[in-house]
């Protein structure tokens, strides 16, 4: 009976994690859609002009610091320490740590903002070298960056609030907060363009960052937050957070360098190669945002809580569960994207100046990236496992080694496969990253899922193969019905393929008794 009760509690816990990940997935999906609309609105009202070039360059400075600090490094360093405080030191000490970090962030980012605003006329000419011959554009860039620097303050505090709420088991408002940023830019551009022109976008950035922070505050207050201005550099928790954040930032920088190096290699290829890689990566971001990013966001506080009470068995089981679920979701997604790559790219992008040749370039790059999609998701879970153990150095070492592997594969594959070789090199380096992280985590925790994890991955591969075969047969039928494959028929083909693919995966999962399928169905349809 004890084992039965344990299994039942374990099942309920898994369903709760999946349900929370579903909420984050929906928020991420809406954020991606509104982000696309935001770009379309900017393109519609401003097009390609000196003003838009000035805006994007000005926005890139505070946005780069956001990407390095607020987007991942802060959460990676704060969540494990805060979870430990909640588990072992009580609510009072935990909230004191939050107030301390909040006040320090306010002081540090506030100082960076003031310095950024004051010295903008001095450093912008070095960032905007091409604008030096156009004083009006250079001055516009200075004014825009001065106006947008406060965005860094708001978004850094928003990232901290998001991390606290996630640790407290609340995911809804953090998941949907970025949507308000997109809406702010869209509304600001539409309403203010006739009055202030390109400055409407800068105003939208400021209000968007503020909204992303303040929409989360009601939930934070409900959880028990009462702000007090506390600054204590000697506090043990503060020292640990800042000790962890430095390697996490270096890891983020390593990833940015990897992207930059790929673009440098691509710059030696024919025109369109860089754009093809960029568009293909945008498509890959959809399944990454819907599944692994959402799941890792939810599972990270859970792993940190388990690690805080030294429940190594719980950490091991949760990591294994996360990778199993990702294998069930991402391996079919990879096969589906590969089978539909040309049609998806054509339907989404082949309009106006985007030619058939551009579609072929992008679809080839997409094929290369798809081969590493599951590994990309698994790396997110494995990295969070190390972070939950308050080990940010091991992932950093692995990221650096993976960067070197990526460079080596770029040299090997660029000549025979061109841009597709660069995409494949990225996938191979991520697979190497996954393997190395798994090896080191296994040495630290013991077996992660073991035989059952291998069986889950093999079942997902078999179901995905059946799905791919079904979509291939459907493509033969559509080619017979409509050899020209017009835009309308491509849309119909994609819809039919998605329905058929989901049906085959569901039927295969039922027949093969795939546990992850049962958990997903239960979490989706079981009442709370």
Image (cartoon, helix red, strand yellow):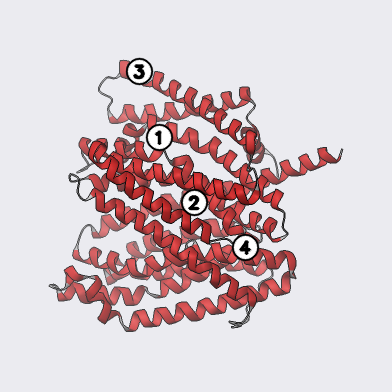
Q: Tell me: 64 left or right of 226.
A: left
In the image, taking residue 348 as reference, residue 464 lies left or right, namely right
Q: Nearer the viewer, residue 46 or 48?
A: 48
Q: In this rendering, which labeled residue sits more in front, label 2 or label 1?
A: 1
The 10 Å Cα crowd at callout 2, few under 14, some 14 to 19, many 20 or more, is: many
Instruction: Give the mark nearest the N terminus, 4 or 3.
Output: 4
Q: Which element carries disc 4, helix, strand or loop?
A: helix
- Sequence-earlier tag: 2 or 4: 2
Crowd rating for badge 3 (residues with CA inside 10 Å; few <14, some 14–19, many 20+): few
**Quick one: SS at disc 3?**
helix
The answer to whether residue 279 shows anywhere in this view is no
Badge 1 density bin: few <14, some 14–19, many ≥20, Cα 10 Å = many
Query: Which of the labelled discs sits on residue 337, or is there none?
Result: 1
Mark 1 or mark 3, which is nearer the start of the sequence? 1
Question: Mark 1 falls on what kind of element?
Answer: helix
- 162 in relation to 476, above or below: below
Question: What mark, if any, has residue 93 been given in the picture?
Answer: none
The span from disc 3 to disc 2 (Cα, nearest Å) is 35 Å
**Above or below: residue 315 compared with residue 168:** above
Residue 499 visible in the current orientation: yes
In 3D space, how far apart are the residues under numbered discs 4 and 3 (Cα atoms)? Answer: 52 Å
Which of these two is toward me, 37 or 406?
Answer: 406
Q: Nearer the viewer, mark 3 or mark 1?
A: 1
Q: Position of residue 164 (x, y in %)?
A: 61, 65
Badge 4 density bin: few <14, some 14–19, many ≥20, Cα 10 Å: many
- The image position of residue 29, as x and y in percent, is 47, 48
What residue sits 27% from the left and 78% below the top? 123
- CA separation in Å, label 3 and label 1: 17 Å
Residue bearing mark 3 = 476
Q: Which residue is label 2 attached to?
A: 28
Side of 500 where 44 appears, left or right: left
């Amino acid at each position: 009976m004890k084992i039965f009760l344990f299994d039942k509690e374990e099942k309920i816990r898994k369903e709760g994690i999946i349900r929370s990940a579903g909420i984050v997935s929906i928020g991420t999906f809406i954020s991606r859609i509104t982000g696309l609309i935001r770009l379309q609105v900017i393109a519609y009202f401003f097009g390609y002009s000196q003003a838009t070039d000035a805006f994007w360059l000005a926005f890139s400075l505070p946005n780069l610091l956001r990407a390095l600090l607020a987007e991942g490094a802060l959460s990676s360093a704060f969540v494990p320490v805060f979870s430990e405080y909640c588990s072992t030191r009580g609510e009072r000490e935990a909230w004191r740590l939050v107030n301390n970090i909040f006040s320090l962030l306010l002081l540090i980012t506030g100082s960076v903002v003031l310095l950024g605003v004051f010295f903008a006329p001095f450093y912008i000419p070095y960032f905007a070298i091409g604008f030096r011959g156009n004083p009006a554009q250079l001055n516009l860039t200075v004014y825009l960056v001065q106006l947008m620097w406060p965005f860094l303050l708001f978004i850094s505090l928003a990232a901290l609030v998001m991390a606290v709420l996630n640790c407290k088991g609340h995911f809804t408002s953090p998941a949907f907060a970025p949507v308000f940023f997109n809406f702010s830019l869209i509304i600001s551009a539409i309403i203010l363009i006739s009055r202030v022109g390109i400055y409407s976008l800068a105003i939208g950035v400021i209000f968007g960052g503020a909204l992303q922070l303040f929409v989360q505050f009601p939930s934070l207050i409900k959880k028990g937050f009462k702000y007090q201005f506390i600054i204590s550099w000697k506090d043990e928790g503060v020292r640990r957070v800042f000790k962890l954040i430095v390697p996490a930032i270096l890891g983020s920088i390593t990833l940015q360098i990897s992207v930059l190096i790929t673009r440098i290699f691509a710059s030696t290829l024919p025109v369109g190669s860089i754009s093809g890689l960029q568009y293909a990566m945008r498509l890959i971001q959809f399944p990454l945002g819907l599944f692994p990013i959402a799941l890792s966001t939810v599972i990270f506080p859970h792993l940190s809580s388990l690690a805080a009470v030294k429940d190594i068995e719980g950490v091991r089981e949760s990591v294994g569960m996360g990778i199993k679920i990702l294998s069930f979701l991402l391996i079919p997604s990879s096969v589906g994207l590969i089978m539909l790559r040309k049609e998806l790219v054509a339907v989404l992008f082949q309009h106006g100046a985007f030619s058939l040749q551009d579609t072929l370039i992008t679809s080839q790059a997409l094929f290369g990236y798809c081969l590493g999609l599951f590994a990309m998701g698994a790396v997110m879970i494995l990295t969070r496992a190390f972070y939950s153990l308050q080990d940010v150095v091991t992932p950093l070492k692995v990221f650096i080694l993976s960067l070197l592997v990526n460079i080596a594969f770029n040299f090997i594959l660029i000549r025979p496969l061109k841009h597709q070789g660069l995409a494949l090199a990225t996938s191979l380096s991520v697979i190497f990253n996954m393997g190395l992280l798994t090896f080191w985590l296994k040495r630290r925790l013991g077996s992660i899922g073991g035989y059952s994890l291998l069986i889950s991955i093999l079942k997902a591969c078999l179901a995905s193969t059946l799905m791919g075969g079904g979509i291939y047969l459907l493509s033969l039928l559509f080619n017979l019905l409509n050899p020209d494959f017009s835009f309308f028929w491509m849309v119909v083909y994609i819809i039919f393929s998605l329905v058929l693919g989901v049906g085959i995966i569901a039927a295969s999962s039922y027949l093969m008794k795939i546990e992850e399928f049962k958990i997903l169905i239960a979490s989706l349809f079981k009442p709370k």
